[in-house]
Image (cartoon, coloured by chain):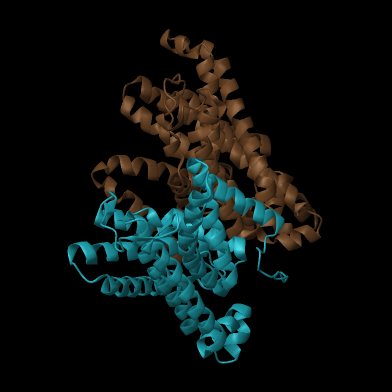
Chain colours: A cyan, B brown
Amino acid sequence: MNLSTLLAQIINGLQTGSIYALVALGYSMVYGIILLLNFAHGDIIMVGAYVVYYSITRFAFHPLLAVLLAVAASVALGVTVEKVAYTPLRSAPRLSLLITAIGVSFLLENGAQMIFGADTKSMDPIVPGSVAIGSVTISYAAIITIAVSVISMFILTRLVNSTKMGKAMRAVSEDMGAAQLMGISLNKTISFTFAVGSALAGIGSVLYLCAYPQASPTMGSMLGIKAFIAAVLGGIGSIPGAMLGGFIIGLLESLISAVHLSMWKDAVVFVVLIVVLLLKPTGILGHKVQEKV
Amino acid sequence: MSIKDKAASGSERLQGRIRIPTPLRYLINSCLIAGLWFALSGMAAGGIINNYWKGILITVGINIILATSLNISVGYLGQLPLGHAGFMAVGAYASAIYMKSTPAAALIKAGDRGAVLPYLITAVLISAAVAGLFGLLIGIPALRLKGDYLAIITLGFGEIIRVTITNIDSVLGFKFTYGAAGLARIPKFTTLGNCFALVVISLTLIHMLMKSRFGRAILAVRDNEIAAESVGVDTTYYKTLAFVFSAMLAGVAGCLYAGYLGSLYPSTFKFMKSIEILVMVVLGGMGSMLGSVVSATVLTVLPEMLRAFSDYRMVAYSLLLVVMMIFRPTGLMGSYDFSMSRLLEKLLNAVFRRGAAADGEAYTEEGGR
């Protein structure tokens, strides 16, 4: 393998990695706040991708309008799911909440299959063209993806660290009861967290379509699980951790493909997860939470 | 506290109550099973159950084993493994590869079912052992983690098993699992008879495990892990035990599945399959064996009856999961389990009007859970 192929694969990995990172952020925030592994998060991306697909191919909207629509649809869906399925179960055992999340995920997947059909819908690349730097060709899609995700993460960090709502989010994830006593509205804060996470998923869906211009009902499940692995790898609940984890998983995958073992890709990612959970369950940047009796 | 202690400690009301002694209880259960078998085989011989229905009944049996075995992990142990289909796959492939190496196919063709029996027993044992071994390998690391991590790690192992089955041939360099093309021409050794027998054996084993001190320890771990640990229950040991046992039975179900269909494809054992089994457990009631049996039966027979709506099946399943969790998280049966002996006791006591006042308290004590 020569240097330019390696570089191309690294750029590829960074592109996929930044999509994983965006999705992982959604997982990480929701998990940080209500300790729920939101299985449906990946499927929100799928719905966002269908919105983009239909608004560009069927209605011939401008791509930017499609992006706005996808983000709006994702946010609406994410908040609806939270209100309908998760809020009634806030005091229920964790197991019930987890089963509900799986149920919602499969409902979205199978619902999409019923509405849009089980086939993969392909479209023309949203951002065609590429630029050559030396012997390495970089597609515009890759540049946009990496740039957009870095900017989103920057905005998110500002949001969480320096706004009132961000403070409320951090307080709720620290101690839900105490936060409520301080006058923070739990419902509002949790819904806001879901909205932000889903908006990131919406952006992620557009970037995914830039990288792989096709939508299918099951595209979200594997993407979602890998993003979750990225979140765990980086340390769940931590924003820089989610980014780091996303980039690591993305790079790992493209390097595996580079050595022609792409069919083992999924297995390797899961092996990484298992190794991380066994050696450092809190992830690279996470911190340990003591369990109370 | 056992019934004896309780009675001895002076609860006078219990004295006059009629109790069926344990050996008699087992006799009653054996009679019920034998009766069910005679009814089934009679109907099969009389042609009331045709081959189509025989197939459905075998599928029901396989699903009962799958659901009740997952119920050990979900209902009794209180964990949520999402890789049950992986254990089923391991068991199915192990028994299929073994059976293909035996002369079983020729014997079945010649109609000599009796001579197949030793091979069948070996196949069941092999699939249970291999699935149990995988359960141990997965359980030891996975059970150190809790809740969502356990779910995602078992999901991961399920996927790893499937990817490995699909791609192992290219690594080994010879045909072993036949990859995505599928393992075909497996002797069709599963019959209504041996399926029924294995269902009965599995249910009996689960019942015996849960009524033993192991079962009580497993329930203690579910109810409060920290409290259980502090009274000296080795939680890791019992968690692993329950998990491995659950995996072994899933392997047995896989063995029956391989022998029923005659061909295996890795794509059968996707994450979706694990969810289907989970729906059965959740619908029936986590922790109720009767619930798992009933919902496995209903969820197998109903889709057959409603072939026209098969497109909506998975949508209905997932909606069912969400609605159940919101409105009736305990499942249809809750943790209730049926006991013929208990019913008889109740009847006898009602007829002879004895110990009626002690009913509520005494029965919950006897209920086993």
Q: Is residue B80 above or below residue B207?
A: below
Q: Residue furthest front?
A: A134
In the rendered image, is residue A93 in sight?
A: no
Q: Residue at x 42, y 36 (%)?
A: B60
Q: Residue furthest left?
A: A59
Q: Residue at x 53, y 40 (%)?
A: B86
In the displayed structure, does residue A8 sit left or right of residue A173?
A: left
Q: Is residue B92 above or below residue B101?
A: below
Q: Quadrant of residue A108?
A: bottom left
x then y, percent, for residue B256: 49, 29
x then y, percent, for residue A88: 46, 73
Give the number of callouts. 0
Q: Residue at x 60, y 89 (%)?
A: A181
Q: Nearer the viewer, residue B197 or B164?
A: B164
x then y, percent, for residue B148: 58, 60
x then y, percent, for residue B23: 67, 34
In the rendered image, is residue B146 in sight?
A: yes
In the displayed structure, does residue B209 sit left or right of residue A222?
A: right
Q: Nearer the viewer, residue B63 or A59?
A: A59
Q: Quadrant of residue B1?
A: bottom right
Q: Is residue B49 above or below residue A239?
A: above
Q: Residue furthest top?
A: B110
